[in-house]
Structures are given as C-alpha cells and as structure tokens.
C-alpha cells in the first residue's frame, strides 16, 4: 500500500469544523476562495475544519480566524467562538500579562506640600 495517501480534507470532523465545512461546501466555496476573502492562511482553515487545533499557535489566532470565517459564511460568530472555547479548553495556557506596579510618587525637592517653592526660605 505504498501509493495510498490519506486525504485530510475528507477526514471526519465533528463540532465547529464540521459546521464550518458544511456551510462552506453548501455555498460552493473552495479553500482557496476562503483564504483569498478572509486572509486566513489555508493551513489554519484546514486545521480548524479538521478539528486539529494543536496545529494553531494560540487561542487569539484561532478565534480571529473563526470570526473572519464565520462572517464570510454569513454565520453568527458568537456561538462558534463558544464552541471553539469548549473544544480547546486546556489546550492553550491563557495567562493575563503581568502588569508592573505603578512607579512610586516622589516629591520634587524644590517644591513643598502646597506648591510653594523652597528656594527663598
């Protein structure tokens, strides 16, 4: 079976990817047309449709791609983004960026409490 190749586009997918693929095929769009209209890389579209979210770099990129793809297909992105969160929970570590504490306020040596200058004491 050396010459047999498995086609990834016909692999069974469920959930988010299956909904997007079914709608795309119903509209008669190819992957190239989706790529051209949304500027989402073709490999990302294939990964989302296959349900292989491990091929995507981060949640923010996957969410942006799903949002653009949904708008192109005329779908509401809200439920699709909720499905994305459900399917990828725990896949990416989403950490809030650490914010530096505000700098310590210092008084100028030349100014007093109420703004009077100390130069002429």
Image (tube, rainbow, N blue to C red):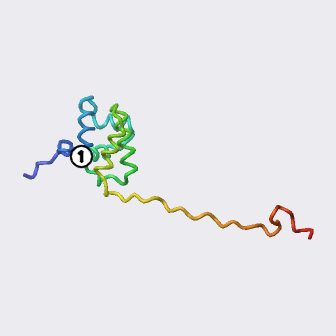
Tally of numbered discs: 1
Return the x and y of residue 76 as percentages of the image width and height. Answer: 35, 35
Q: Name the residue nearer the viewer: 47 or 35.
A: 47
Residue drawn at x 33%, y 36% is 34
Location of residue 10 with respect to 91 vertically, above or below: above
Location of residue 54 with respect to 109 vertically, above or below: above
Circle 1 Cα neighbour tier, 10 Å, few/some/many (<14 / 14–19 / ≥20): many
Residue drawn at x 72%, y 67% is 106
Is residue 9 found left or right of 88 in the rendered image?
A: left
| Residue at the top extreme of this rendering | 27
Residue drawn at x 37%, y 43% is 65
| Residue at the left extreme of this rendering | 1
Return the x and y of residue 85 as percentages of the image width and height. Answer: 33, 49
Residue drawn at x 29%, y 37% is 31
Return the x and y of residue 71 as percentages of the image width and height. Answer: 37, 34
Q: Name the residue nearer the viewer: 15 or 2.
A: 15
Name the quadrant containing residue 94: bottom left
Mark 1 residue element:
helix
Image quadrant occupied by the C terminus: bottom right
Q: Name the residue nearer the viewer: 104 or 19.
A: 104
Name the quadrant containing residue 15: top left
Location of residue 98 with respect to 46 vertically, above or below: below
Is residue 11 found left or right of 70 in the rendered image?
A: left
Is residue 67 found left or right of 9 in the rendered image?
A: right
Name the quadrant containing residue 67: top left
* Residue at the spot of label 1: 50
Is residue 36 found left or right of 17 in the rendered image?
A: right
Return the x and y of residue 23 as percentages of the image width and height. Answer: 26, 33
| Residue at the right extreme of this rendering | 120
């Amino acid at each position: 079976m050396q010459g047999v190749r498995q086609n990834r586009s016909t692999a069974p997918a469920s959930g988010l990817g299956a909904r997007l693929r079914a709608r795309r095929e119903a509209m008669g769009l190819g992957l190239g047309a989706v790529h051209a209209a949304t500027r989402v890389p073709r490999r990302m579209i294939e990964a989302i449709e296959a349900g292989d979210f491990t091929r995507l770099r981060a949640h923010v990129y996957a969410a942006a791609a799903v949002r653009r793809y949904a708008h192109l297909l005329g779908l509401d992105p809200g439920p699709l983004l909720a499905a994305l969160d459900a399917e990828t929970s725990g896949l990416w570590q989403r950490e809030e960026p650490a914010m530096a504490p505000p700098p310590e306020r210092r008084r100028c040596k030349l100014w007093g409490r109420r703004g009077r200058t100390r130069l002429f004491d």
